[in-house]
Each structure stands twice: as structure tokens, then as C-alpha cells.
Amino acid sequence: MSWLEQSWYRPYSLSLLLLPITGLFCSIVCLRRLAYQQGWLSSFVCNIPVIIVGNISVGGTGKTPVVIAIAQYLQSMGLKPAIISRGYGGKQPLQPIAVSSDSIASEVGDEALLLARRANCPVWIGRKRALVAQAVAQTTDCNIIVTDDGLQHYALARDIELAVIDAKRGHGNGFCLPAGPLREPISRLKQVDFVILNGTGAGLSNLTADTQINYQMAKVLNVKAGLNMKRNLNDWQGKTVHAVAGIGHPQRFFQLFAPYKIDIIHHSFPDHHLYSEKELDFGDEHDIIMTEKDAVKCQLFAKSNMYYLPITVQFDQNWQHKLATLVQSKWEQKMNKKLLDILVCPICQGKLEYDKKNQELICKADKLAFPIQEDAPVMLESEARHLSEAELV
Ligand code: ZN
């Protein structure tokens, strides 16, 4: 972490000298958001529901395992999710592309590659999320989109917003960039559907989260052999290990070793770092344990002493139920709209308008209102109601 990033997490520091720029930054952020809300700037509205898993701060808050868990949960609901991501750490193509488990990390980015290997659903990347969502909706049979990050990417309209907050680091000093770590003011959290607190910690006192998650560690896997070689962290008890993390907040990874009495030598690298073989040659025979995101970039030169620690998260059942209910209702709304896009007036073949209150489909040209009975539109002239002149205004 740079000195500036570190200073965001201290109460009194030089970064506060940047407060005038923060004021300017906040005004731009607020204006931009207002512009999308007022329709001065247009958002792409996807015809399948879009769930954003994002955050309001810069740096890692541990979203990737959450994105994987959400996608898996949607699958368990019988939906077909696709994950979209910008492809950080890769070339971030302008044209959307599909990522597969044998894509190359330097091209598609380490997070997207990790998602493709773990989430068991299509993963697409591109610099503009709105274009990527459009490509997914048009070319795949997916019926819901989960976006990794992109809470501030308002060019893509969203149906559900989740904000993941790192409990230990919290909002730092609470200021927006560059005096603090925030991309939007803390008040933005009041507008998201769910706040997910990652871990426990002193970083936040006045934040009410909708749910809290803890990382769960699976078996340690060998980078070269993968699932064919599983071990327990306990195997390294009393031994020395090189712990390697090139993620937004490496401490979060190093802390996982604490309960195991393993003597670890820390090696922090920048987020999305592309490793060379030489960088991971520490000149001794100790085993190396890295994050899963690092492992996808080391496969080509991995030695037999390189391992990685996959992380999973599990949601609490009550919250999972709340998410399912919201997803269900958003999904129905979208499908109704999609249906309406296809439906035309049986008489003039013109476009219909949906009157939610009266549960009717209106053709203004023919002055008719077709009833919707038990969610099914009845498109028969004999069943339609004639509209009065007053109703047509
Ligand atoms: Zn008509």
C-alpha cells in the first residue's frame, strides 16, 4: 500500500490536506449520479435482471468470493446467471468477450479467470459493463446478470444493489477520494438493497449491515496438481511457509494463518500483479502458499512446493431468503416487461401500454383496454373494455 492509502486509515494524517480536492470530487460524483437519475445521461436497461456486487471504497473488500456465492445461489434457485466484470489486471477489451477456464490471466485479468474457474456459469468481460450486459442478454441463454464491481457504473441500470464492506478497514477516515478511500459518500449505502459486512472488526461502529459473512477455508490445493492434491493447513503447523498475496488487502490473507501456529514470511504484491518465475524463487525449500487469485497466474511455471488456499463464503439463511424474494420479484417485473415488448394489439398490431393499477393493456389507437387475468393478458376484442375519451387523455 502506498503512504497515501495507509494514511486513509489513520485519524489525523497528511491526506486531510487534500480535502479541497475531495470537495470537488464529491460534487462531480453527485452531479454525475443526478444526471443519470434525471435521465440527462442515459443508462442501458437490460431485459434480464442485473444484480450489482460492489462497494463504495477503493481497494479490495473481498467481493470475488461473494460474487461466486451469489451466482451459485441463483443457480440453486433454478436461474441461469452470467457474471460480468471489467477484467481488471487484463487488457480490458472494448468489445465484450467470454472468459473460459483456460483463458490467459494477462489477457482477461486474474479475477475474471478465477470467476470462470469457480463459478460454473458464463463469465464475460469488457471495459463498458453496459455493452457487456447487452452482449450477454443477446447471445447467451442466461436470465440474470451478476456484476462484479460497478456500483458507480451508472451507464448500466440495475435491479438490485449489494455493497460489500470490509469490517476491519471500514470506511477509513470516512472521506471521499483523494483525502479518503471512498468513491461515493457513506450516505450512498442507504440507497443500496443490501449491505454485506465482510468479517468482524473495529472499523465500523455506526453502520447497520443486512448480513455479515466470514471467509471459510477449504482444503489447501497444489497449484500444479489442483484438485488432485488436497492438504490441510494443519500440515504446516510449526513449519515456515512463504505466504504470497497480490490482492487489494494482503493482510486479510495473512491473518487466515494466525490460528495454525505456522511461521509465515509475508510477501505482499500489488493487486492484479503478474508474477514472473523469479519473483517467487525465495532461495530456500520452504513451501509457498498463495491466494487463489495469485494461483491462476502461476500455473505455467508452478513448482511442486506451490499451494493455494481457496476461500468460500456462506450466507446466513434468513438473508438468503430475503435475497431470493427480491430476486423473484425483480425477475417477474422484467419478464412482464419483456412480454409487453413482444405483445401487440390484436387489431391494429400497434404497441400496448401497461396500466398497472387496473391490470389492463391499453391500445390508444383502438380505444380498448385488454384485461390481465391471473397474470395472463386476455388479448380478445370481445373481452376488451372500451375506453372513454376522458381515460385517453
Ligand atoms: Zn390497437
Image: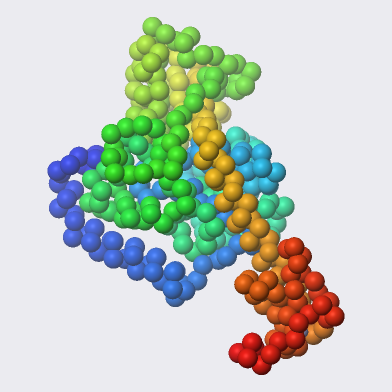
The chosen color scheme is rainbow
The residue lying toward the viewer, choosing from 36 and 378, is 378
Give the residue at x 57% y 61%: 131
Q: Can residue 113 be seen in this view?
A: no
User: Which image quarter: residue 370?
Assistant: bottom right
The residue lying toward the viewer, choosing from 290 and 30, is 30
Left or right, 344 with reference to 103 = right
Left or right, 249 with reference to 211 = left
Left or right, 77 with reference to 169 = right
User: Which image quarter: residue 247?
Assistant: top left
Quadrant of the image containing the N terminus: top left
Residue 172: % across, % down: 27, 43
Residue 162: % across, % down: 47, 48
The residue lying toward the viewer, choosing from 56 and 240, is 56
As drawn, 259 above or below 166: above
Residue 389: % across, % down: 66, 93
Looking at the rendering, the quadrant in which ligand 1 lies is bottom right
Give the residue at x 32% y 32%: 201
Give the residue at x 55% y 28%: 299
Give the residue at x 26% y 48%: 174
Q: Residue furthest bottom?
A: 389
